[in-house]
Amino acid sequence: MNYSLKELVLADLYRYEGKTDTKSFLHAYATYEGFKFSVWLRMCSVARKKKLTKIFILPICRMIYRHYKYKYGYDIPYAIEIGPGLQIFHIGGIVFSPAKCGKNITLSQNTTVGMTIHNGKKQYPVLQDNIYIAPGAIIIGDITVGSDVAIGSNSVLTKSVEDYSVVVGIPGKVISKKGSREYVSNRI
């Protein structure tokens, strides 16, 4: 589904602040590095889709996006479709490249969501909605992470998991079906 820039930014803002007024936007932009980065990520993502904005707006947005990308250590390509409600905690070490991604994704520091190469073919994970990825977690390969999943600290997930799973360990194992409800706040 195509979301407008306003819808995406306000959804991300709601995840941080629980409201979407101007004062909350200014507070979140000044306070949360993840929100500041996601604003420019969203601007690049939307600007690249139309010819005029791609020519005139994208170069400026991309310059600011790259500044924050390197400043905060977030490797999240703006070309991938990320659903509304992205929340990024803490600075540093985030590599995020799923094939596609739903709404209300929460990323913690030092996490990797990325590809593997199998028989010469790149394979990326698919993330559904309301997923919490704890510090140090790794999700790789041609897998699907169901909705309302919590992935514990330093877990390595290489196999698909069903909705409402709580995953921990190396390799990741489902230990509960309580899901991510207590970890994903201010859902949209």
Image (cartoon, rainbow, N blue to C red):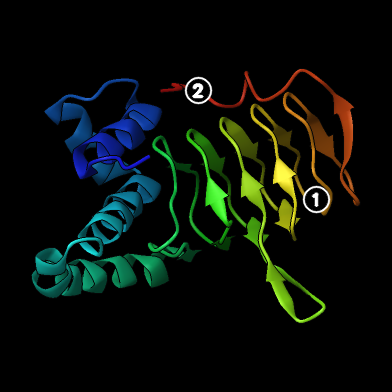
77 or 50: which is nearer to us?
50
Alpha carbon of mark 2 to alpha carbon of mark 1: how far?
A: 23 Å
Q: Tell me the element at label 2.
A: loop
**Which residue occupies 36% across, 51% down?**
33
Q: Residues within 10 Å of mark 2 (few under 14, many from 20)?
A: some
24 lies left or right of 139: left
The numbered disc on residue 157 is 1
Q: Amino acid at mark 1?
A: Leu
**Which residue occupies 30% across, 71% down?**
67
The numbered disc on residue 185 is 2
Instruction: Locate residue 80, reporting x and y percent.
Output: 45, 59
56 lies left or right of 112: left
**Which residue occupies 41% across, 35% down?**
85
Instruction: Locate residue 162, reporting x and y percent.
Output: 78, 31
Q: Amino acid at mark 2?
A: Ser
64 lies left or right of 75: left
